[in-house]
Amino acid sequence: MNVTIVDYQSGNISSVINSFTEVAKGKVNIEVTSDIKKIKLSDKIVLPGQGSFKSCVDSLNGINGLADTLKEFAITNKKPLLGICVGLQMFADVGYEEAETKGLGWISGKVSKIDNQNGKFKLPHIGWNEINIIKDSKIFKNIKNNSHMYFVHSYEFVPEDKSVISATTDYSSNIVCSVEKENIFGTQFHPEKSDKTGLNLIQNFLNL
Amino acid sequence: MLKNRIIPCLDVKNGRVVKGINFVELKDAGDPVEQAKIYSDGGADEICFLDITASNENRDTIIDIVIKTSKECFVPLTVGGGVRTIQNITDLLLAGADKVSINTAAVKNVGFVKEASKKFGSQCIVVAIDAKNVSDNKWEVFTHGGRNKTSIDAVEFAKEVESNGAGEILLTSMDKDGTKSGYDVDLLKAITKSTNIPVIASGGVGTLDHLYDGIVKGGASAVLAASIFHYGEFKIKDAKEYLNSKNVSVRL
């Protein structure tokens, strides 16, 4: 099996590479590339994302044909794709970080700033928080409800269709922290930094 | 609910841990990778390396350590010490660090914080502030490990780094550092009340109760400690169980 971690200059992806390599243990081929030909031949894709929504979308669009190739992979061919952090947020139609920016539009909704309730909640939301699993998602196999995952973000994905939400986390309000729509998966938290529970999630994705 | 973080810090000099943990199970007490792994297996919420290597020639050793550690520890890794240029940050992040902490370079030029957070995202930019009490409820920023006075007000500086894109503040009291008499709670309070980004408390921990004070009285989102963990007085688990028993939420 070939799994591609999309390297589109979206910031630091070393931890994503290390964690997938650790879980794959040589049995799964992990490729790190933005080469469209290789992406097309992959069985699964991981779409990381760090920095702002705008900078990630701009970087993605800066690589000729990448957005279309990802769309063909995930929407037309319905092959498994996992978005992490801003990688998940980009599924939305629109994001409001830095400037209003069009997203990939795969899951209807918007990405807006977490309401800090006039400074009551510090932003970024950094650290370990519990996830409330509200939908049986394939990537949560053997992961208990209220497990801790590592978060670092100031913006949240608000999908229109609430049925795609597989988990939320409590910070100021119930923040969407995991989605599953058919073959498309996304986590707002960082499984690659969430110790054994995070590695378990990565294993589940590789096992799909 | 977001949990309060416990962060053990390892001082690394020329690639070796200074003041390291002295557990019998350690094969090599000076190996930072092995120590980081013990902490992460023991439930540390993050790991922090502070590179105190004096000379520039030996700076590559920290990169090598980060590469090795990030292949074994799957919790966030922060690296500080001598981070002065965008290239320094790029090198550390590519090696596998998740965050970098900037100290002297931020004081010299706060624009560097802005540039770095714009390029890499606020999530990976921590500004380390070393502060000394100068008069009643007044603290001044010091650099170069507390040797150089800057005349910059610590509270004002904290606000400034926040507005320039810092994602977190690592706040060390130079009065308390090494004393084991507890954090400077007043300093913590002053900074956590005037900023809206998470503050990591550092400097002075001698007992588990000090960790409680940093979080509950000082308002810190995370507590950093070195010696109480290094010398095996307490394990990370002890600290978490203690805080939990006092109704402070931690990841158990």
Image (spheres, helix red, strand yellow):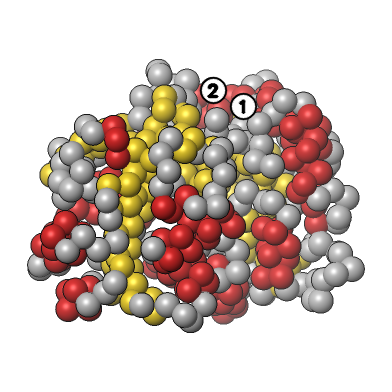
Look at 26% across and 74% down and name the residue there.
Answer: A42
Disc 2 crowd rating (10 Å Cα; few below 14, some 14-19, many 20+) is: some
Report the front residue among B117 and B67. B67
Residue A4: which numbered mark, if any? Answer: none
Position above or below: A106 against A172: below
Q: Quadrant of residue A99?
A: top left
Give the residue at the far top of this rendering: A118
The percent position of residue B80, horizontal first and vertical second, equals 56, 58
Q: Chain letter for mark 1, please.
A: B
Count of numbered circles in the view: 2
Left or right for A77, reference A126: left
Q: Quadrant of residue B159?
A: top left
Dot 2 amino acid type: Lys
Q: Which residue is mark 1?
A: B219
Position above or below: B161 against B137: below
The percent position of residue A67, horizontal first and vertical second, equals 14, 60
The percent position of residue B157, horizontal first and vertical second, equals 48, 35
Secondary structure type for disc 2: helix
Residue B193: which numbered mark, if any? Answer: 2
Are the residues tagged 1 and 2 within 8 Å (C-beta)? yes
Left or right for A112, reference A100: right
